[in-house]
Amino acid sequence: MSANHKSTSKHLLELWGDNALHKSDDYLSADYVNHQMPDAAAGVSTKSLAEWRSLIADFHTGFSDVKMEVLLQVAEGDYVCSRWRMTAKHTGTFNELAATGKTTSWTGVHTDRYEGDKLVESWVDWDKYGFLEQLGMVGES
């Protein structure tokens, strides 16, 4: 149960690196909900499965050389918590941010909730400030 969920959560996080969203259908509920804290665009958001897929597609329009590394996972019951690091090169427009050509690396925590074999809900908390600072969008001028 939990070991399989850990493997599934790891695999789904790694999809950010290979942009293979088509593989997610085997794991995600049609009613999947993704909570972004903070949202990449602004504020905090709750995304449907379609909106989540759109976010990933938009991300891959703006970034290349994406590497997702799962650093730690803990599972209990129907929940899996994963700490991760992502690295990507900003080569296109993302959320109205013109390409900088810079590589950025940031960490986050992803908590997933399962019902049976399907992932139904995720909470994502990530270092947006560090992400933007490395792109030269915030911080020292």
Image (cartoon, rainbow, N blue to C red):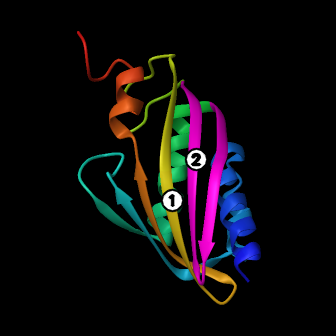
User: Looking at the image, is mark 2 or mark 1 earlier in the sequence?
Assistant: 2
Q: Local crowd at mark 2 within 10 Å, few (<14), some, or many (≥20)?
A: many
Instruction: Tell me if residue 78 is in the magenta stretch.
Output: yes
Where is residue 113 drawn, in percent x and y? Answer: 53, 78
Q: Secondary structure at mark 2?
A: strand
Task: Name the residue tied to disc 1.
Answer: 110
Residue flagged by tag 1: what amino acid is it? His
- Looking at the image, is 39 positioned above or below residue 80? above
> What residue do we see at 50% from left, 71% from top?
49
- Looking at the image, is 70 positioned above or below residue 62? below
Q: Which residues are magenta?
A: 65-90
> What residue do we see at 51% from left, 42% from top?
59
Q: Quadrant of the C terminus?
A: top left
Residue flagged by tag 2: what amino acid is it? Trp
Q: Main secondary structure of the magenta part?
A: strand
Where is residue 23 drawn, in percent x and y? Answer: 74, 64
Q: Quadrant of residue 61?
A: top right
Task: Name the residue tied to disc 2.
Answer: 84
Would residue 11 be found to the left or right of residue 64 on screen? right
Would residue 11 be found to the left or right of residue 111 on screen? right
Asked if disc 2 and disc 1 are in contact, CB closer than 8 Å, the reply is: yes
Instruction: Tell me if residue 15 is in the magenta stretch.
Output: no
- Looking at the image, is 123 positioned above or below residue 76? above
